[in-house]
Image: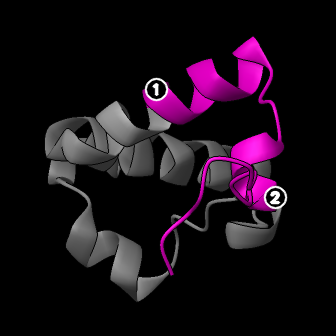
Amino acid sequence: MPQTAHQQPTLHYEQVRQKSPLVTALSDFWRAFRKNKPALAGTVIVVFFIFVAIFAGFLAPQGINDQNMNSPAAAVLCPLVWNG
């Protein structure tokens, strides 16, 4: 429907809403960052390592000094000089 001179154009909510500079800057950053595939891969790797560090106690509940060097598996896995 063509508009006449006395009619105001209708505006949608998205056109009227003002965005803050922070929201605009973050959305611009995310748009550019999403296109950079090596940066996304590096972020996933870093987040994975942080996750492993936070939950290390659950992933490996034994301590560093809780080794059983007298087991048959330890004799196979350790070199002879380590067995004493």
Which residue is depicted at the point 22% across and 76% down?
76
Q: Position of residue 41 (x, y in %)?
A: 27, 49
Secondary structure at badge 2 equals helix
- Residue at image mark 2: 13
- Residue at image mark 1: 29
Q: Do labels 1 and 2 touch, CB within 8 Å?
A: no
Instruction: Tell me where residue 57 sits by quadrant.
Output: bottom right
Instruction: Tell me where residue 77 sits by quadrant.
Output: bottom left
Which residue is depicted at the point 69% across and 70% down?
59
Task: Give the extent of the magenta segment.
Answer: 1-29
Query: Which residue is farthest top?
Result: 21
Q: Is residue 55 visible?
A: no
In the displayed structure, 77 sits above or below 42; it is below
Q: How would you rate the neighbour count of disc 2 (Cα within 10 Å): few for under 14, some for 14-19, many for 20 or more?
A: few
Q: Position of residue 37 (x, y in %)?
A: 17, 47
Q: Position of residue 11 (x, y in %)?
A: 74, 55
Image quarter where the C terminus lies is top left
Q: Nearer the viewer, mark 1 or mark 2?
A: 2
Viewer-proximal residue among 83 and 28: 28
Q: How many marks?
A: 2
Which residue is depicted at the point 17% across and 53% down?
79
Instruction: Inspect the image, locate mark 2, and give the three-letter code of the amino acid beneath it.
Output: Tyr
Q: Left of 46 or right of it: where is 59? A: right
In the displayed structure, 67 sits above or below 44; it is below
Instruction: Inspect the image, locate mark 1, and give the three-letter code of the amino acid beneath it.
Output: Phe
Q: How would you rate the neighbour count of disc 1 (Cα within 10 Å): few for under 14, some for 14-19, many for 20 or more?
A: few
Instruction: Tell me where residue 56 sits by quadrant.
Output: bottom right
